[in-house]
Amino acid sequence: MLKNKYSLPFSQFKLLLGVIIIFSLLIIIELCIPPPVHGQSLNKNKYIFYPETKFAVIADPHVFEVEGNINNPIYLKYGVEDRTLLKLSAVILEKAVDDIIKKDDIDFVILPGDLTDSGDMKSHQVVAEILRKFKKTGIQVYIIPGNHDGFKTKDYDINKIFREIVTPEEFTKIYNDCGYSSAIYKDNKSLSYVAEPVKGLWLLMVDSCIYNSPDNYRVCNGRLRTSTLVWIDDILKKAKEQNKAVIGSLHHSLLEHYKGHQRFFSNYIVDDFEELSNQFAAQNIKVVFTGHHHAQDIVKKEFENNKFIYDIETSSLIGYPNAYRMIQINKNNEMEIRSEYIRELTSFKENFSSYTKNYVRVKVKQVAEDKIKKFYLNLHDLDKISDKAADAMIAHYQGNEKIPDTLKIKNLDLWSIFIYGFYKNLLTSLYEDPPPADLNIKIDLRTGSWSNLD
């Protein structure tokens, strides 16, 4: 009786106990195994390492082939010193090329535009021939156009120009071996492209030039076409999916390099730069190399979620301080940036650095005078204020600016004091260089921190 009385409840108890044990095990397993996520979410915060490499950056060589063009209006419009440097422009570029070739283990060279001064066929052919020296030694070259590199379009009346200005199609043919033939992706609406000079590293070479204006074949300011932005977005998604690190390059600045950059010199910074820099940083472009403004200057911008981007601008090779950059990415994912200079030319008997410094200073002083003479200052005060402007711009071009003890000018009349009060804000901003340092630094590509190199 006892057996029959208690056997059913006991079997039910065993069944219930088994269910409880199994259910508990399922809960434990559920807690231990992370929930499934989409591939994109997995890679959201994944750091992509940069491969070790060494490369150089040459900006704005402004080569002008003078042979057969001594009486060309383009050539004659320049002053005596301008024409001297134009005659030397090809020699200066060749000197930089030779110096870089002598260095050890250089993988590639970037040239972010203004390869020529007038965008003509002869000058481009001279540049291409000089750059072939790199190819012969196994160094790859990647170029993009600048605003001085053309372009003749169907909208522009070229009859006023006495030299053959290249078309975009001619540009890519001339420089076929300088990035276009080895491109893994090309934008069919601009001269932008992507190359992979070192396994795991993509170069995003961005065409930021405007060359379809009916009024001018070398418009100074820059912008990215909507179609190009869509193309770039797709490229950066591909880079993330394929675990490729990305370095960018464009002719125009991507960031403001000093307070008032956009306000006073908007033609030297790409349109919509705030939105673009945010987009680039969000999509893991940590460094871009630029030119156009002819200064040795580096600036960094930080964004949310520990994102950052550096804009590394390099001076014009033809203008003071006649610099180019040498870059190395080491095994610790640090980018070392060093400034190198063309100090002398065998074909030039004078002190080359002093000559170009004086040349640039005179040009800046003239520009400053032209801008402020409309305020009807007396000639004495105009000279003093434009002198201050020239000093400030030379300091900015050179990099690592140091603000003088005072920017005050003695013995100005009341009207000049009033005008200079406004103008001094720009000069102050040129001296108050935002971090980092401009010439020789090391960047941690993972954290964005930087330090000076010895």
Image: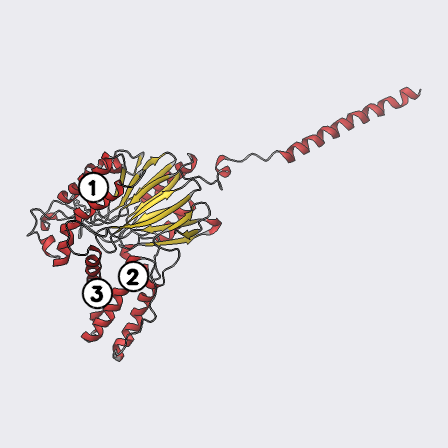
- Give 300 or 10, whichever is nearer the viewer: 300
- Give 293 or 153, whichever is nearer the viewer: 293
Badge 2: residue crowd in 10 Å (few <14, some 14–19, many ≥20):
some
* Measured Cα–Cα span from mark 3 to mark 1: 35 Å
Residue 284 visible in the shown view: no
Label 2 amino acid?
Ala
Do the CB atoms of the residues marked 3 and 1 lie less than 8 Å apart? no
Q: Position of residue 205 (x, y in %)?
A: 30, 42
* Residue at left offset 25%, top offset 79%: 413
Tell me the mark number nearer the camera, choosing from 2 and 3.
Answer: 2
Identify residue for label 2: 395
Do the CB atoms of the residues marked 2 and 3 lie less than 8 Å apart? no
| N-term-proximal mark, 2 vs 1 | 1
* Measured Cα–Cα span from mark 2 to mark 3: 13 Å
Per the image, label 2 sits on a secondary structure element best described as helix
Badge 1: residue crowd in 10 Å (few <14, some 14–19, many ≥20):
some
Identify residue for label 1: 168
Identify residue for label 3: 365
- Give 307 or 298, whichever is nearer the viewer: 298
* Residue at left offset 78%, top offset 25%: 15
